[in-house]
Image: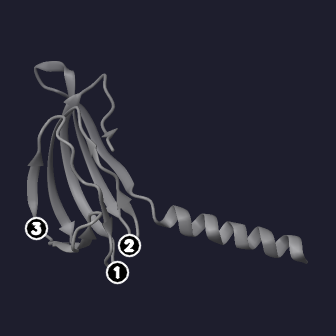
Amino acid sequence: MLLPTLALGAALIAGAASAQEVKRTDLGRSPLSGDESKEIVVQLVEIPPGATSRRHFHNGQEAFYVLEGGKVQAPGKDPIDRAAGEHGINQREVPHAGYTNVGDKPLRILSVYIVDKDKPLQVPVP
């Protein structure tokens, strides 16, 4: 009886850990017209409560729009609201993010990237 209980406990812990990961869903990819070295990528980024969007940069530009807002907190900073409708541009190779969703609902962001096709979409930074 102990073995099934341990297996169930491990499965629940694994499920809880994976529930706190940022989920990136590709909605579309296409070569950039007139420049085959670049591509346009459209993603839905979902950050559940307790998950951290690690600090990173992109090999190109990102335009984002917050679909469903929430409360986020960067290390050593006060929590701030990311409101639905917030939008902006993240420039090539400029680090951003590095915050945790400290609210009680998922943060959902639509991101559109124009990036170098032969490089990673996201590069982590300390």
- The residue pinned by badge 3 equals 85
Quadrant in which residue 23 is drawn: bottom left
At horizontal 17% and vertical 63% (from top left) the residue drawn is 66
**Residue 35 relative to residue 99: left or right:** left
- Residue shown at 17% from the left, 40% from the top: 94
> Given this view, does label 3 or label 2 mark the residue nearer the observer?
2
- Is label 2 in a helix, a strand or a loop? loop
Q: CA distance from mark 1 to mark 2?
A: 6 Å
Q: Position of residue 35 (x, y in %)?
A: 14, 19
Q: Given contact means CB atoms under 8 Å apart, are the residues at marks 1 and 2 in contact?
A: yes
The image position of residue 73, as x and y in percent, is: 27, 69
Question: Which quadrant of the rendered structure holds the N terminus?
Answer: bottom right
Q: Amino acid at mark 3?
A: Gly
- As displayed, is residue 6 above or below residue 25? below
Rounded to the nearest whole Å, what is the CA distance between mark 3 and mark 2?
19 Å
Scheme by which the image is coloured: one colour
Question: In the image, is 71 to the left or to the right of 48?
Answer: left
Q: Residue at label 2? A: 49
Relative depth, front residue between 41 and 95: 95
Tag 2: amino acid: Pro
Question: What residue is at 32 percent from the left and 41 percent from the top?
Answer: 125
Query: Which of disc 3 and disc 1 is earlier in sequence?
Result: 3
- Frontmost residue, 6 versus 106: 6
> What residue is shown with label 1?
104
Q: Position of residue 122 (x, y in %)?
A: 31, 39
* Callouts 1 and 3 close, C-beta under 8 Å: no
**Dot 1 crowding, Cα within 10 Å, few <14, some 14–19, many 20+:** few
Residue 124 has which mark? none
Categorize mark 3 by other alpha carbons within 10 Å: few (<14), some (14-19), many (20+): few
Q: Amino acid at mark 1?
A: Asp
